[in-house]
Amino acid sequence: MRAELLRLVRHSRRRAVYVGASLAVVALAAAATAVGESNRGKAASAGGTLTMARVADIFTMDPVQTIDDRSIFTNLQIYDRLVKLSRDGKSVDPELATKWTISKGGRQALFTLRKGVEFSDGSPLTSADVVAAINRERDAKAPWSFLIAPVKSVTAVGPTKVKFTMAEPFAPLLPALSTFAFSIYSKKQFAKYGKGLGSHPLGTGAFMLQSWKKGSELDLVRNPNYWQKGKPHLDKVVFKVVGDDNARVLQLQSGAADVIDSVPPNQVEAIKSHNDKVESIFGSAVGLLVLNTQKSKGPFADKNARCAVAWSVDRSAVARNAYFGLAQPAKSSLPNKTLYWSGNQSAPGYDLTKAKAFLAKSSVPKGFTFSVDVDSGDSPAATALQIWAASLKKIGITMKVTKLEATTVQDRFNTQKFAARYVPWTNDTPDPDEQLGAGLDYKGPQHSLFTSYVNRTAYKLMVKARSEMKAAKRAALYAKVQRSMNTDCSAFIPIVDLPRLYASGPNVVGFSPNSQGKYSFENVSKK
């Protein structure tokens, strides 16, 4: 069994390192200490502007309201969190917290804040800011509140310490706190702007907002009060919206863009031959067909209708022809390097005879028609859906592929106006609780990630796994969750495990996404 992120078995002066079985929030008094309490200073003189061409614009810079990847990645530049996931995904490193202790029994955690940290406007960070930000995200109406559901209170212990009290042992506490959702922002700024914080962010991160032309360009500039000495190296980061795959590649090759996201798999070798660099992160992302199970949106409240669709896709053909061999057939809704991933849990395969049998037992035995939203710039996804549609047609089901601008697809998803959507899901940590919590929490504000899917058996198992501290037992619970979702043909039909692909020009130094495909620019410079 692979080494597991979530058990603290040794300490480092720089970070808490996790190997072995489960997060030792109960086994040990865990602690991590950063080198230097405050090392804020003047930025390096390298300077310059870095331009990144991205497939879509963001929705918000309010961490509580953030759903989409581009907003997540932008928030990572503006805000810090108490801890951050290490690049290899096997540890959490100090960020705004320099050390922490977990009580024996795992029901309390005490974090000590870094001294001398200021927001980008020069105002000091205090424990009151941390408590306000995290308690706002803990609100049951907040989209990501499930990530720390066992936490029953967060309180300040003086100006530099924050205490978490849990209702029960909570294995994924530290990974959860490393996610974008628990970014720390100014309490006063939120009091001033409320939900308008999404356009008026104030954080302690390496960059701060300069301007935002919605749908076109977002500009960040260096935070003059950043706490990491000599960073960031860049004066400015410009995010340009370039929805077309070919156009992004051309901008990279011409030098109009320094970095691009969503690299088309069929152009990877051509990009490399142009002396540009390609970053490929595999194991943290999976392509899913996400189904709206509301009866008003089609037949997918019916398990048999879902199963007919799930058993009609040739995943090997998709991996080979849509992703040029860079993807692998998926056997779980969890990306295949997620902790406790199991490929032996009755995953749906490609069997049209079985698909026909499911259809015959469904509420629509003569077939049906449904539409799938897909980003217009995501050509591999469109190809994958075309392969799938050809198979579905053989059993009497018509899939209509609807290509829309990426922000429109996301908006339709967020408001449950979709029947089905192709989603390239990426975890923010290797722990399975994030994806399963989002997809199975039918009681929460996201209604099972906007699908209204209900699987009470899997939900109860997932909740139990959060408080299970022994690796073997946790693994067994997650195996049962995956089996339950596969046999129920859940609203999240796995297609292929995907690589996250980025490319950068030869003048870019230090651009290195972490194990989950997340990137930030405090360490990046240009030659």
Image (tube, rainbow, N blue to C red):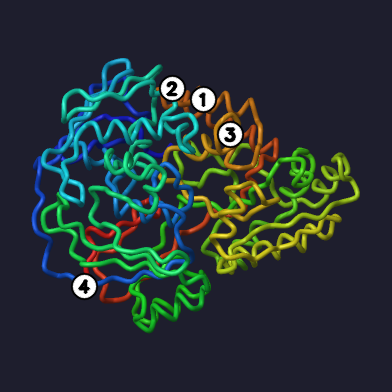
Residue 440's mark?
A: 3
Q: Which residue is mark 2?
A: 467
Question: In which quarter of the view is residue 129 placed?
Answer: top left
Picture disc at residue 184: none
Q: Name the residue that disc number 4 marks.
A: 48
Q: Amino acid at mark 1?
A: Val
x, y percent for residue 479:
56, 32
Q: Is residue 269 visible?
A: yes
The residue under the point 27% across, 40% down is 188
**Labels 2 & 1 near each other (Cβ < 8 A):** yes
Give the answer, above or below, for where 382 lies relative to 446.
below
Mark 1: which secondary structure? helix
On screen, residue 179 above or below 235 = above
Q: CA distance from mark 4 to mark 2?
A: 47 Å
Residue visible at 46% across and 37% down?
144
Residue at the right extreme of this rendering: 366
Residue pointed to by mark 1: 463
Q: Secondary structure at mark 3?
A: helix
* Residue type (three-letter) at the residue carrying disc 2: Ser
